[in-house]
Amino acid sequence: MNAALALVGKGRHFASLGIREVTRQAGVVPTSFYRHFRNMDDLGLQLVDELGLVLRRMMREARANVLQSDKLIEESVGIFVAHAQANRSFFLFMAQGLAGESRAVQEGIRSEMRFFASELANDLRRLRLMEHLSDTDLDLTCDLVVRTVAFSLTDLLSVSQDDDYQIGQIRKRTTRFLQMIFLGAGHWQSDSA
Amino acid sequence: MNAALALVGKGRHFASLGIREVTRQAGVVPTSFYRHFRNMDDLGLQLVDELGLVLRRMMREARANVLQSDKLIEESVGIFVAHAQANRSFFLFMAQGLAGESRAVQEGIRSEMRFFASELANDLRRLRLMEHLSDTDLDLTCDLVVRTVAFSLTDLLSVSQDDDYQIGQIRKRTTRFLQMIFLGAGHWQSDSA
DNA sequence: CATCGATGTGTACACTTGTTCACTAATGTG
DNA sequence: CACATTAGTGAACAAGTGTACACATCGATG
C-alpha cells in the first residue's frame, strides 16, 4: 500500500498502476502481491479505509485547536492545508479516486466525504452555530463546504509542495469561499425560499 | 479521439488507456495512431481542445434560453445537466482529467474552467446582477459557482444516465447550492469583510 | 493522367503484464 | 521444541504493450 501511494505521489495515476509495478516499488516479487490483495481494486479499497483514519485524525486536531477561536474558518482551512501537505499522496489518491475507474473506490471516497460532512454538521450544532437552519439545510451547507474544500485539494495538489506563495493564495481563496458560503447559510430561509 | 472517448464512456479511466487499445476500438491498426498523435498525452490535449468547443456551445445555449427568465439558476442548472447527459463521455474525460496524470491535460481543463468562470462573470455584469461586488469578488463568486457545478458533474456521472429520479435530486441539490452561494454573494462586503 | 501528401497496413522486436504453481523462509502459538 | 500459519521466492506461460520500418491505398491538385 505504501508502494502504491509512493507511485501516486510521484505523479502516476492510480488507475494506471499495475501489480508488477507496485511490487517492484515495494521491493518484493510480483507473486507476493496476492498474499495481501486479490487485485488492484482491492488494494484501492484498503487505501480508502486508511484514508478514513487520516481524515478522522484531521478532524480531531481541528476540533482541538479551533474551539476557543473566533477565526474558526481560517484556522480550519489552515489545518486542512497542513494535513493535505503532510499526507500528500493520500490526498492525491483521494482526488484521483473521485473520478477513478473503480466504482467501489469511488463510492468509498464519496462515503468518507459524507461522513466528514455529517461530523461537521454535528460540530456546528454543538457550537450553537447556524441554529436557524433545519437539519436538512444544515446538511446541505456542510455538504457544500466539504465539496468546496475537496475541490481546493485539487488546486493544492497541483502546485509544488514548497511553493509557499501559491499555497498561501489557495488557503486565502478557500477561506473566502467558505466565508461566502456561511454568509449565504446565515441568511438562508430568512429572506429566501 | 472518438474511440478514446468511447472507452472512457464505457467506464475506463483515460490514464489507463493504451495506444493499441484505442486503435483497436477505432478499428484501425496500431501504427496508424502515430499519423495523428505523438502519444496518449497528445491525444488528451486535443480532447481538451474539443472540450472547449462543447463548453462554448453549452454557454451559448444557456445565454439564449435564460435571458428573460427569473428562474435563472434553475434553468442554467437544467441546461448544464442536459449537456452533461448528451456529452457524457466528454464530461467524464473532464472530471478524470482534473486529477489526471498528465500535467498538461490537467492545466488545460483548469484553464477551460477559468474561461467559463470569466464568461459567467461577464454575463452577470451584463444582466446588471451583483453590481455591488468588486471585480475581484465577482470573480471569486463565479469561480466558486463553476467549482460547485463541476463537482456536481461527478455526482451526475456516477449515476446511470436514465435514473431520472437521482438525476432530478442532483439537479435540485445543485440548484440549492448555487442559490446559497448567490445569497452569500448578495450579502458579501455589506455586512462582512 | 501523373504525382504528392496524408492515411492506413503488415511484420517484426524487445519488453512488460497478470496469474499459476510448487517451494522456502520467517513468524508466533501450543 | 514442534508445528501451523503467514509472507516471500523463482520459474514459467500466454497475452498484451509501444514503437520502427517499408510498403500500399486513397483523394486532391498540378
Image (cartoon, coloured by chain):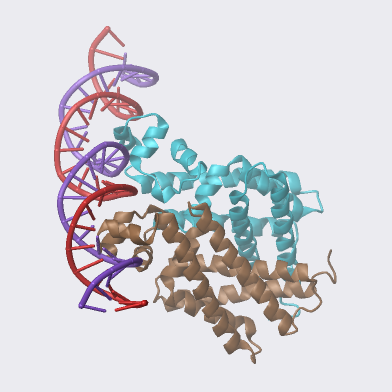
Chain colours: A brown, B cyan, C red, D purple
- Residue closer to the observer: D24 or A30: A30
Horizontal and vertical percent position of residue B127: 75, 56
Up the image or down, B80 lies above or below A37; here it is: above
Look at the image and tell me in which quarter the N terminus of chain B lies. Answer: top left
User: In the image, B193: left or right of B51?
Assistant: right
- Residue closer to the observer: B28 or A41: A41
Query: Residue visible at 47% across and 61% down?
Result: A45
Look at the image and tell me in which quarter the C terminus of chain B lies. Answer: bottom right
Horizontal and vertical percent position of residue A2: 36, 68
Locate residue D6: give its quadrant: bottom left
Query: Could you tell me if residue B111 is visible in this image?
Result: no
User: In the image, A161: left or right of B30?
Assistant: right
Query: Could you tell me if residue B11 is visible in this image?
Result: yes
Count of number-bearing discs: 0
User: In the image, B2: left or right of D20?
Assistant: right
- Residue closer to the observer: B71 or A27: A27
Up the image or down, B58 lies above or below B27; here it is: below
Horizontal and vertical percent position of residue B66: 75, 48
Locate residue B20: give its quadrant: top left
Up the image or down, A81 lies above or below C13; here it is: below
Q: Residue furthest bottom?
A: A68
Horizontal and vertical percent position of residue D3: 28, 68
Query: Residue visible at 79% across and 70% down?
Result: A188
